[in-house]
């Protein structure tokens, strides 16, 4: 099971054998344009294939003016 940390108080576990980061985000209802993602502690682009025991952390951009 892959763990996806969406916020400090929300973690999802999903069964994915192989999918891109973008596909995982869309599966979870997260807009890929508004976040960056780390896999096992390292930042990765949206086209990176993840799965298995990977651990993703979704980091939201805070913007405004």
Image (cartoon, helix red, strand yellow):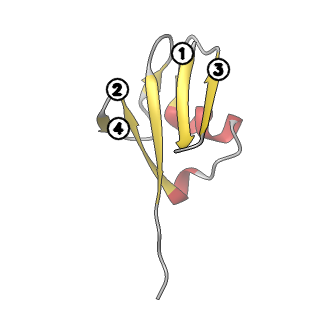
Which badge, 2 or 3, comes first in the chain's sequence? 3
Label 4's element?
A: strand
Q: Is residue 6 left or right of residue 49?
A: right
Residue drawn at x 50%, y 34% as measured from the top left: 21
Q: Disc 1, disc 3: CB below 8 Å?
A: no
User: Which quarter of the figure is the N terminus placed in?
Assistant: top right
Which badge, 4 or 1, comes first in the chain's sequence? 1
Q: Disc 3, disc 4: CB below 8 Å?
A: no
Which badge, 3 or 4, comes first in the chain's sequence? 3
Q: Disc 2, disc 3: CB below 8 Å?
A: no
Image spot of residue 50 (x, y percent): 47, 22
Which badge, 1 or 2, comes first in the chain's sequence? 1
Image spot of residue 39 (x, y percent): 38, 30
Mark 3 highlights which residue? 14
Mark 1 highlights which residue? 18
Residue drawn at x 46%, y 31% as measured from the top left: 56
Residue drawn at x 57%, y 10% as measured from the top left: 17
Q: Residue furthest bottom?
A: 65
Residue 44: mark:
4
Mark 2 highlights which residue? 40
Label 3's element?
A: strand
Q: Disc 1, disc 2: CB below 8 Å?
A: no
Image spot of residue 31 (x, y percent): 62, 53
Compared to residue 60, the image places residue 18 above or below, namely above
The span from disc 1 to disc 3 (Cα, nearest Å) is 11 Å
Label 1's element?
A: loop
């Amino acid at each position: 099971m892959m763990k996806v940390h969406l916020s400090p108080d929300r973690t999802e576990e999903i069964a994915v054998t192989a999918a891109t980061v973008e596909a995982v985000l869309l599966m979870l209802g997260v807009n890929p344009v508004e976040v960056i993602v780390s896999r096992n502690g390292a930042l990765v682009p949206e086209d990176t294939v993840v799965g298995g025991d990977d651990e993703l952390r979704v980091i939201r951009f805070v913007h405004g003016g």
